[in-house]
Image (cartoon, helix red, strand yellow):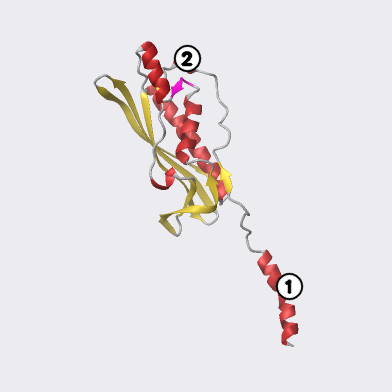
Amino acid sequence: MRRRGLIALLPATLVACSALPKKPANQVMYDFGPTPAAGPDARGEHPALTLPDVEAEGLLETTALLYRLGYEDAFELRPYAYARWSAPPTRLVHQRLRDVLGRQRAVLDNSGAAALVRSSAQRPPLLRVHLDDLFQLFDAPDKSRGIARLSCTLLQANGGGDRLLGQRRFETERPAPTADAPGGVRALSAAVDAAAEDIARWLQQA
């Protein structure tokens, strides 16, 4: 009787196990996807700009894809176990900024700026960007959004030191289409795109 009872329970156990969410066999790598469609090329309308590497600290210097459970403990920053960025977010943000700002002007790295100084004695303004936050926030188990925070400092280098031209902090957020890592990636990519557009508009007025 006991053996027959165990056999009878086996199908139900298998059904219950099959209903559990399956973990991916390998880690999934994400980036910000294609750059949003650009408008008319306006690079000749604005002066060149030096954009050194984006700075950050802690987990933002790794490839961890981060989230917070706002409904449980919003103070705990957690990494997804089976989803990561293809490169540290600082590099992804830097490339997206180059793409977006490059529609308006020439965007140079430090070596390019040095070459411009040697050839024309002109020092292009320098934009320092610090990535303060980039994470997916779950307001509920089935609802989340991507949040990006960047601090920007615009400087003009000269022989006597750097002169401050402007400083501003940008914060953007976008809703996630799904409450999981793929949805978070799409929300974070959209939030970074929005921040890049805001920075571009700010530079036009600086």
Question: In terms of depth relative to the viewer, which is nearer, 49 or 140?
Answer: 49
Q: Is residue 110 magenta?
A: no
Q: Is residue 176 visible?
A: no
The number of numbered badges drawn on the structure is 2
Q: Secondary structure at mark 1?
A: helix
Q: Write the start and end of the magenta stretch as one range.
A: 104-108
Residue 90 occupies quadrant:
top left
- Sequence-wise, the earlier of marks 2 and 1 is 1
Question: In terms of depth relative to the viewer, which is nearer, 80 or 167?
Answer: 80
Q: Which residue is mark 2?
A: 44
In this rendering, position of residue 8 left or right of residue 67: right
The residue most toward the left is 160
Q: Please report contact status of discs 2 and 1: CB closer than 8 Å, yes or no.
A: no
Q: Which residue is mark 1?
A: 11
- Residue 85: x and y in percent read 52, 44
Q: Give the residue type that dot 1 points to.
A: Pro
